[in-house]
Amino acid sequence: MNPRLYRTLAATTVVATLLLIAVGAFVRTTGSGLGCPDWPQCHGAWVPPLERTAIVEYSHRTVAVIVSVLVYGLAAATYATRRRDRALVQLASMSVIVLLVQAYLGKITVERELPPWVVTSHMSTALLLLAAVSAMTAIAWRDDRRTAVITPERASVLRTLLVASVVTYVVLIWGAYVVKTGAGTSCISWPGCSAAPTPFVDGGLAQTIQWVHRLSVVIEGAVLGWAALALRRQAPGLQRGAWALVWLYGAQVLVGALNIWTDFSAAARVTHLALAATIWAVLIVTTVAAWYGEASEDAQPTSAGARTRTHEEQSAGA
């Protein structure tokens, strides 16, 4: 498979995975999680009945099948044409394993009638799958020009991006838990919470869960801003990643407020999660791009001891 086609396949898989996460959010917000009470069939048939919840739930399964085909196809293309590229092979293997785990969790989610811990785990694996295919896309974009940039300055940037990625992942997982426990609608005002004006003192458990989510989003904004500042003196591509993170975070906060202002409309809730997942994907791509920089991008002197490694050296374990 030629590099251009491989990159297209990888990018398409990322987009399809984002769509799968968005459709999953629509299933949850519309209460259609048990629209098909069995798995993999729907009401004992391969064609769902003409009922709204069944059609919504089955649409999620249909997109999941499309994503599965793309992930398996990307993995097969990697094993067949890029088996010497250790990073791509490892990520391809990870994506297949995570996809299998996600499918199993989807099965027991239905069989056990949507317990919060299973639903949250299902979301966490979807994000891991998105991370794997996003990383593959970023690596494929570099292709043979790829080098590992090893400088003290770049190492500091990478640590910042790693912290931002971990915080964002935790915020996303907690957000899924908030929705599943019903705490998402426990505060009907923004940015404060009229039902619990003083965080962790007023209100009940639902308001506490909601306040944890809101404050964690503030922390996420701080670390994303930190990451954007760390990227401001890097190569142009990394600077664009920084701006994307800033704008996406701002849009996510605005849509989070729209959840309140639109009385928790399905459109606002789905868009909120879709933007959060996109931030996660952009973080992964930016982190990989920061690690695998082109030598020409870092041609200017940085720090003593700076060096790069080609992907051939990495594959050989140099």
Image: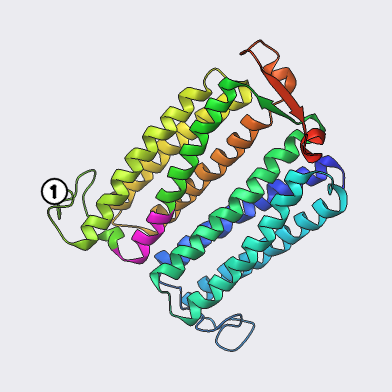
User: What residue is drawn where x is 52% and y is 44%?
Assistant: 280
Q: For numbered disc 1, what is the local secondary structure?
A: loop
Vertical comparison of 305 with 253: above or below: above
Task: Please state the extent of the stretch shown in magenta in the rendering.
Answer: 173-182
**Percent from the top left, x then y, of residue 13?**
68, 53
**Percent from the top left, x then y, of residue 137?**
69, 43
Q: Which residue is mark 1?
A: 197
Mark 1: which amino acid? Pro
Residue 61 lies in quadrant? bottom right
User: What residue is drawn where x is 50% and y is 28%?
Assistant: 243
Asked if residue 272 shows in the view, the reply is no
Vertical comparison of 100 with 223: above or below: below
- State yes or no: residue 177 in magenta: yes
**Percent from the top left, x then y, of residue 21?**
53, 58
The colour scheme is rainbow
**Percent from the top left, x then y, of residue 289?**
64, 32
User: What residue is drawn where x is 52% and y is 32%?
Assistant: 159
Vertical comparison of 105 with 142: above or below: below
Name the side, left or right, on which 291 lies relative to 69: left
Q: Residue furthest bottom?
A: 44
